[in-house]
Amino acid sequence: MKKVYLSQRRRDAEKISGSSLLPSCLFESTILLFAFFFIALISFPTALAAQQTLEGVRQLLDVPYVSNGHERQKLDLYLPQIHDDNPRPVLVRIHGGAWRHGDKSAQRGVAGYVKQGYIGVAINYRFSQQNIFPAQIEDCKAAIRWLRSHAEDYGIDPERIGAVGSSAGGHLAALLGTTGDSRQFDVGENLEFSSAVCAVVDNFGPTDLMKAAQTPGYERKMSAVTQLLGGTVNEKAELAEQANPITYITPADPPFLIIHGDADPLVPLNQSELLHSALVKAGVASEFHVVKGGMHGGDPFKAEPFKTYLKNFLKNNVMGKPTASLID
């Protein structure tokens, strides 16, 4: 940062006014007072937000979930300040951003669930510009396995880990849900632990990339998918099939909560309709809600009745005990 000395500021003021109207000590005190109030003004919202988000919550930021891994292979943990002997369920938030931008810091709101009895986790994953699919889901699964491998360290109940995501994050959360009984994307460390989740919240995530590209009005909006796959869905049809959560649906999949706006300009509504129908057909519990006039996220998704839908779903399927063990 460039240094500006107060004596120089005073001389500049004298040049402008033509005389030294302020004593040196008064001028410098005025500058310092102004600087104090300016810093306080710009810092107050940030400090207040941090206090509101993290009060009573212990945060561990930028924790690597892969040893000597990529800079994006890190997660944030939000834990109760006072550790008790009762293992807690975990909510894992996966950020969106077309698989090529975004950050776990935008998911800091998951810290609010700590007061409701959860442990909050927000994860980063490698971007598609340098690492095409399946790097993203491999990272998500590595993070889930890491959490299970450190369950005793942080008071985690390894059988109660739920995944929540929106847009690209919703796609990855859904893929975690439908590939829980497959080891296809489990690579790297902690392979003795499962990467399955006990529940999925998918907000307007892509689920069938080929059909999304064929939806009228969306054909030219698939550049993010092209980058994810390293080519168009037609050029990379086999990889696109592997990237579809729908591909892996079995009756053993966990419950889903799916929410999508019917005016979404980026991900067509049929993506959630297709996923919901396929889950129901397989006998998987799926709850699907359409936000009338809803776009690609925004305030309507955080308002009632959707706020209550989310709260009840998590209470019944993450806070509540799963019916079957997820541990290998």
Image: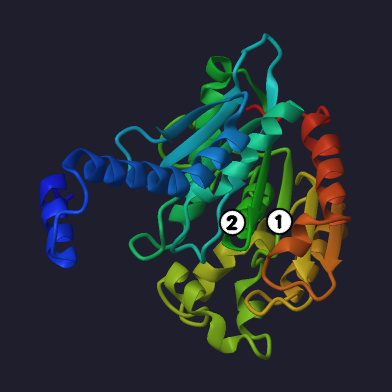
Question: Which residue was labeled with disc 2?
Answer: 169
Instruction: Give neighbour class at mark 1: few <14, some 14-19, many 20+ (Cα, 10 Å).
Output: many
- What label sits on residue 194 in the rendered view? none
249 over 325 or under it: above or below: below
Display colour scheme: rainbow
Q: From this viewpoint, which residue is outermost toward the bottom?
A: 216
Alpha-carbon span between mark 1 and mark 2: 8 Å
Three-letter residue code for mark 1 = Asp
Residue found at x 63% / y 54%: 175
In the image shown, does 205 or 244 lie closer to the viewer? Answer: 205
273 over 253 or under it: above or below: below
Q: From this viewpoint, which residue is outermost toward the top?
A: 85
Q: Report if residue 88 is visible in the image.
A: yes
Q: In terms of image quadrants, where is residue 207?
A: bottom right
Instruction: Give neighbour class at mark 2: few <14, some 14-19, many 20+ (Cα, 10 Å).
Output: many
Three-letter residue code for mark 2 = Gly
In the image shown, does 107 or 44 lie closer to the viewer? Answer: 44
| Residue 196 point in image, percent of width and height | 64, 39
| Residue 322 point in image, percent of width and height | 80, 31
Residue found at x 62% / y 36%: 52
In the image shown, does 114 or 133 lie closer to the viewer? Answer: 114
- N-terminal label among 1 and 2: 2
Q: In terms of secondary structure, where does tag 2 sit?
A: helix
Left or right: 150 with respect to 198? Answer: left
| Residue 233 point in image, percent of width and height | 52, 78
Question: Which residue was labeled with disc 1?
Answer: 202
| Residue 218 point in image, percent of width and height | 62, 85
Q: Report if residue 194 is visible in the image.
A: no
Q: In terms of secondary structure, where does tag 1 sit?
A: strand
Residue found at x 83% / y 36%: 315
Q: In terms of image quadrants, where is residue 16?
A: bottom left
211 over 35 or under it: above or below: below
